[in-house]
């Protein structure tokens, strides 16, 4: 926890402070001591205003929206209302003759309940100014109460009774208690079936020893819970989650119970959080955390796992002990008052705001502090005190910008003293996002982007300022990004690249739906964009026709993309959501053409925002205002020094596969070093195959030489130096056994005949004949002859005969007659006459006496 500020005042010394955070927004905290005033501070500890009262403040509360603070004071019958939006105070005469003791706004409407020391009640409607006095609601001082979401009002009094009234002040229920009530809450008991009746259960601490649960719809069956005597008195309690109650006891115990009827009376969790005493507990639903304070320490628990204590803060100077805890609704700030009369405010949740440019980071480290660092370059971090609590941060090479609403402040990082505010600019609408480069800032607001110089004289700035889109027909701008030379912006159906050199649009890419986010690499040569259908795409702006690839297995929950800034990993990027980081790699040159592959994913810890990726290490921003490093599981091969192998063979093979998918072969030699250290024959084969796929012939020769594959080395050396990339890719695809791909590549090269030669060498005769018809008809006879020989060898004499005829020479005709006689031995007599006619046609071309003799015998046998 970061201590944001401490409030102390002489008038508060030695007194217990009464204080309230502004509801919803948490921008103000109102504090009252024993003096006759309420001091209002902003969330940074600066005094905003002071309300002077006729007596000590005895109660105050903010309305549901945090617009109006209502205050009641001793010696006064007036209700004081401070309007936060205009910083003005007004008074309302309550009309009550006795001293007011209790004040509370409704959870859902403009109703204000005020109780008095004699038990009277006033309900005031701030919208209509209607007052409803209810005399005799109780017979003694009203001390505590709570509104339900259905506008029922429960009140507790020193007369030991609990009353429940409607918004008109009419009593709905009343019950007697076994002691003085304290801390009343409406809630919903945990049941097997969710009640449709809303908040029907009233809980009240009775005599600091009993926790009573009273069902408005079943008043006869109240539940009274008592606890072990060693715990001490009930100091404070809070409902949370699905019917759970957290209770703090005076002897330092911290207990959680369930209100489910089967679990009533059982303690789900118990801890002796504080040695001597406990003073207060608080719950933050926004953070899902609980806090307790006692002695001189604060302990914060995770509600999802109560035994996990996420923070312990010791206030050693507070020797008299602590008093009350209170969180803002958003969980960002936690206040604790002390017995000494001071108020400490801690930052428990920081907005995760950050940006990166190259390897430089800028991120929020406190509500009014931005830290700029560059660990890769070894720069000393610079903490910049900013003028406003920002809603966005942008960083460039020389500047950092922060802002909120329609205003931005620019701070220098170089040339001036780091952190000097150069200027602040108001834009024409609320800024959705901002990007910087060395010279320009680009702000996106209300569907437009304003581009302007960060530093420069007024006339230069006006000359160099431009509003996009320059043509309304381009539609609304949904996203934008800056690199050194280009502005990229996406609209409802297009992605534009605008160049600073010529000040004109240099390329555009039409898309079927809106382009919602765009993430260029540092040089702007490639970019990833996410569309309105949550699809991810990789695009090269210089070649928008053939260079758009849909990212495989792209999660619809992705919120951002980071490119790896390591010099050798320019084609590697990660896409992330709240839970995981997905690593992708662009394989620009492969036998299959350019493609993008999903390498794997890495789990992210809760509330971490990735800011920078460098050589497989992800720098993330945390909710505590710090950064943490996450080693990507897809880069596990980097965890061991080169030459060591401590992993099992399956793990080693997995690391090798990851390195290959990340193309760590040529750039760094990582994969070769891995195989040298502990590679099996299968690993060497996988490396060789990857080299062929990526067309890395030199490395492939080296790999196959080391693995002893002489044949592959000779084959690769025979194609070394081939300049035609399609021809080279065809050779490599053939070596890999992908013959159809090889044929396509050969046919698109400057040597298409290679496809025919490959099919002929592979004895793929049908494919060879088809290619010969397209590429070289004079080869048909030779291929037919070779095909016929092959068919004859396997006994397919009919087809062999047909192909011998196509490739007929004198010797081929002799071979054809031999085929026919061979057929005569096997086919049925029905075909004898047909075949002999065929032989008779061929006989004049034959000079062999043996064949003539055999033909004569055959005719003689037929009686001819």
Image (cartoon, grey):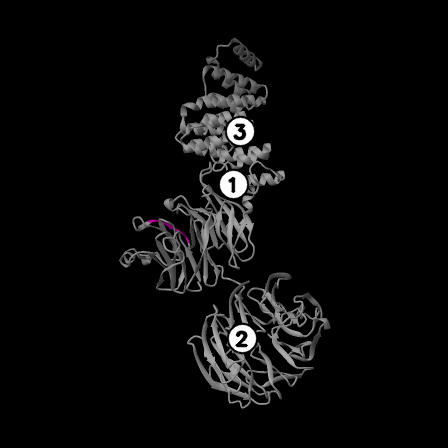
Q: Where is residue 23 in the image (x, y as percent from the top left)?
A: 51, 72
Residue with the mark numbered 2: 19
Determine contact: label 2, label 1, CB under 8 Å. Answer: no
Label 1 to label 3: alpha-carbon separation: 19 Å
The first of marks 1 and 3 along the sequence is 1
Query: Which secondary structure lies at badge 2?
Result: strand
Q: Which residue is drawn at 73% across and 73% down?
A: 229
- Left or right, residue 804 beside residue 450: right
Magenta region, residue range:
506-512
Q: How crowded is mark 2: few (under 14 residues within 10 Å), some or many (20 or more)?
A: many
Tag of residue 661: 1
- Left or right, residue 575 beside residue 486: right
Residue with the mark numbered 3: 704
Q: Residues within 10 Å of mark 1 (few under 14, many from 20)?
A: many
Is residue 719 or residue 397 the one in the foreground? 397
| Residue 273 versus residue 704 in the image, above or below | below
Tag of residue 819: none
Q: Position of residue 121 (x, y in %)?
A: 56, 86
Asked if the magenta segment contains residue 661, the reply would be no
The residue at the far top in this view is 849
Label 3 to label 2: alpha-carbon separation: 77 Å
The first of marks 3 and 2 along the sequence is 2
Q: Main secondary structure of the magenta part?
A: strand
Q: Is residue 533 visible?
A: yes
Q: Is residue 32 visible?
A: no
| Residue 493 versus residue 753 in the image, above or below | below
Quadrant (top left/top right/bottom left/bottom right) for the N terminus: bottom right
Is residue 787 or residue 822 the one in the foreground? 787
Quadrant (top left/top right/bottom left/bottom right) for the C terminus: top right
């Amino acid at each position: 926890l970061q201590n944001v500020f401490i409030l102390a005042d002489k008038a508060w010394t030695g007194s217990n402070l009464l204080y309230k955070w502004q509801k919803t927004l948490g921008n103000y905290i109102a504090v009252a001591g024993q003096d006759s005033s309420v001091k209002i501070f902003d969330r940074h500890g600066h005094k905003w205003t002071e309300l002077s009262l006729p007596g000590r403040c005895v109660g105050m509360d903010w309305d549901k929206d945090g617009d109006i603070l209502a205050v009641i004071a001793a010696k006064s019958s007036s209700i004081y209302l401070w309007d936060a939006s205009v910083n003005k105070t007004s008074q309302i005469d309550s009309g009550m003759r006795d001293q007011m003791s209790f004040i509370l706004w409704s959870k859902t409407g403009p109703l204000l309940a005020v109780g008095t020391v004699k038990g009277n009640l006033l309900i005031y409607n701030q919208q209509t100014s209607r007052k409803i006095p209810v005399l005799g609601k109780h017979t003694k001082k009203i001390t505590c109460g709570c509104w339900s979401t259905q506008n029922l009002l429960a009140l507790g009094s020193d007369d030991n009774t609990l009353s429940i009234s409607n918004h008109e002040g009419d009593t709905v229920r009343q019950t007697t208690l076994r002691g003085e009530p304290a801390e009343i809450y409406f809630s919903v008991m945990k049941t097997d079936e969710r009640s449709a009746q809303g908040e029907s259960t009233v809980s009240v601490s009775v005599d600091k020893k009993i926790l009573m649960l009273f069902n408005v719809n079943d008043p006869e069956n109240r539940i009274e819970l008592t606890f072990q005597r060693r715990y001490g008195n009930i100091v404070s309690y809070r409902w949370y989650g699905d019917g759970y109650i957290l209770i703090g006891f005076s002897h330092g115990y911290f207990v959680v119970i369930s209100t489910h009827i089967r679990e009533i009376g059982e303690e789900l969790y118990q801890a002796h959080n504080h040695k001597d005493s406990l003073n207060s507990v608080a719950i933050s639903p926004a953070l899902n955390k609980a806090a307790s304070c006692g002695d001189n320490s604060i302990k914060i628990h995770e509600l999802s796992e109560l035994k996990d204590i996420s923070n312990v803060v010791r206030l050693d100077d507070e020797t008299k002990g602590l008093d009350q805890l209170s969180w803002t609704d958003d969980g960002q700030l936690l206040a604790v008052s002390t017995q000494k009369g001071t108020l400490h405010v801690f930052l428990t949740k920081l907005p995760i705001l950050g940006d990166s440019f190259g390897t430089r980071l800028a991120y929020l480290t406190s509500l009014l502090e931005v830290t700029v660092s560059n660990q890769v370059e070894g720069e000393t971090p610079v903490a910049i005190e900013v003028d406003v609590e920002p809603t966005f941060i942008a960083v460039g090479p020389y500047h950092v910008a922060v802002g909120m609403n329609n205003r931005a402040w620019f701070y220098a990082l170089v040339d001036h003293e780091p952190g000097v505010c150069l200027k602040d600019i108001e834009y024409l609408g609320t800024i959705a996002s901002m990007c910087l480069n060395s010279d320009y800032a680009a702000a996106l607001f209300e569907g437009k982007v304003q581009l302007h110089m960060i530093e420069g004289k007024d006339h230069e700035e006006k000359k160099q300022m431009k509003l996009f889109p320059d043509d309304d027909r381009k539609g609304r701008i949904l996203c934008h990004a800056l690199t050194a030379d280009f502005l990229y912006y996406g609209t409802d159906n297009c992605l534009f690249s605008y160049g600073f050199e010529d000040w004109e649009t240099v390329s555009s890419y039409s898309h079927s739906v809106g382009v919602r986010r765009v993430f260029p690499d540092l040089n702007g040569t490639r970019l990833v964009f996410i569309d309105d259908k949550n699809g991810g795409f990789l695009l090269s702006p210089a070649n928008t026709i053939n260079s758009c690839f849909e990212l495989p297995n792209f999660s619809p929950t992705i919120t951002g993309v980071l490119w790896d800034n390591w010099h050798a990993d320019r084609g590697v990027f990660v896409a992330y959501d709240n839970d995981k980081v997905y690593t992708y790699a662009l394989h620009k040159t492969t036998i299959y053409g350019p493609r993008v592959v999903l390498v794997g994913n890495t789990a992210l810890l809760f509330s971490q925002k990735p800011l920078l990726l460098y050589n497989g290490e992800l720098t993330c921003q945390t909710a505590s205002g710090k950064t943490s490093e996450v080693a990507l599981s897809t880069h596990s091969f980097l965890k061991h020094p080169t030459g060591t192998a401590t992993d099992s063979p399956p793990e080693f093979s997995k690391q090798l596969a990851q390195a290959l998918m990340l193309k760590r072969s040529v750039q760094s030699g990582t994969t070769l070093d891995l195989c040298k250290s502990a590679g099996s024959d299968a690993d060497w084969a996988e490396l060789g195959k990857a080299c062929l796929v990526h067309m890395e012939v030199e490395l492939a020769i080296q790999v196959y030489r080391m693995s002893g594959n002489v044949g592959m080395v000779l084959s690769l050396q025979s194609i070394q130096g081939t300049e035609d990339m399609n021809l080279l890719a065809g050779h490599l695809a053939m070596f890999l056994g992908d013959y159809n791909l090889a044929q396509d590549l050969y046919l698109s090269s400057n040597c298409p005949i290679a496809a025919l030669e490959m099919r002929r060498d592979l004895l793929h005769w049908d494919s060879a004949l088809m290619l010969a018809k397209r590429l070289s008809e004079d080869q048909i006879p030779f291929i037919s002859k070779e095909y016929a020989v092959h068919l004859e060898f396997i006994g397919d004499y009919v087809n062999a005969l047909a192909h011998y005829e196509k490739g007929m020479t004198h010797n081929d005709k002799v071979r054809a007659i031999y085929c026919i006689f061979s057929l005569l031995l096997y086919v049925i007599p029905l075909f004898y006459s047909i075949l002999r006619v065929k032989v008779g046609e061929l006989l004049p071309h034959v000079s062999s006496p043996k064949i003539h003799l055999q033909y004569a015998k055959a005719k003689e046998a037929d009686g001819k």
